[in-house]
Amino acid sequence: MAISLIATCKTHYSNSTGEGCKYAGHSVGRRDHRGVKSNPKNARDVIAQIEHEDMAVMDLIRSNEWIVMLDEHGLDVGSEQMASLIGDAGNKGASSLLFCIGGPYGHGRQLRERANVSIKLSSLVLNHEIALVVLCEQLYR
């Protein structure tokens, strides 16, 4: 199954993030990273920033993708449940799985409605690069 990642962040993934995620590609089949640049011009208007990022993420989502939204209020899953989640997506006919890491203020309404499931990686709030490395490590398992 093809697995893709979208992260909303200020810059492109750093070398350490890219190195950490290289290993996941060997175990999960084709994967790609799609970045959405956070809009610092809207930093004072949180609603506008969330809406801007939401529209940018929605533009990158393909119609056949099964969406896993990473959110601090999502389901608390362990490694075994993450593996089951990926298997369940395949059993439900998904040919592609997309993990979405939100911006500093979270996800917008459109993505929340489109997501098939919402999970959290930790009870801690993680910055985007750390969340991406943790996610890639779990996909590698």
Image (cartoon, rainbow, N blue to C red):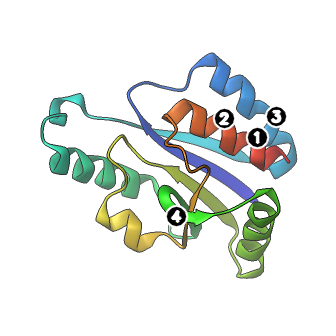
Earlier residue among tags 2 and 4: 4
Looking at marks 1 and 4 on the same chain, the residue that comes earlier in the sequence is marked by 4
* Residue type for callout 1: Glu
Q: Residues at badges 3 and 2 in contact (C-beta under 8 Å)? A: no
Query: Nearest the camera: 76 or 94?
Result: 76
Q: Position of residue 44 (x, y in %)?
A: 13, 35
Instruction: Measure the alpha-carbon separation of dots 3 and 1.
Output: 8 Å
Q: CA distance from mark 1 to mark 4?
A: 19 Å
SS category of the residue bearing label 3: helix
Which residue in the protein does label 2 denote?
133
The amino acid beneath tag 2 is Val
Q: Earlier in the sequence, mark 4 or mark 3?
A: 3
Q: Residue beneath label 1, please?
A: 137
Q: What residue is at 43 percent from the left and 71 percent from the top?
A: 114
Of label 3 and label 2, which has the lower sequence position?
A: 3
Label 4 Cα neighbours within 10 Å, binned few <14 / some 14-19 / many ≥20: some
Which residue lies at the image location 48% right of the left edge and 26% below the top edge? Answer: 12
Quarter of the figure with residue 33: top right
Tell me if 42 is positioned left or right of 65 in this view.
Answer: left
Residue 74: give its label: 4
Residue at 16% of width from left, 30% of height from top?
A: 41
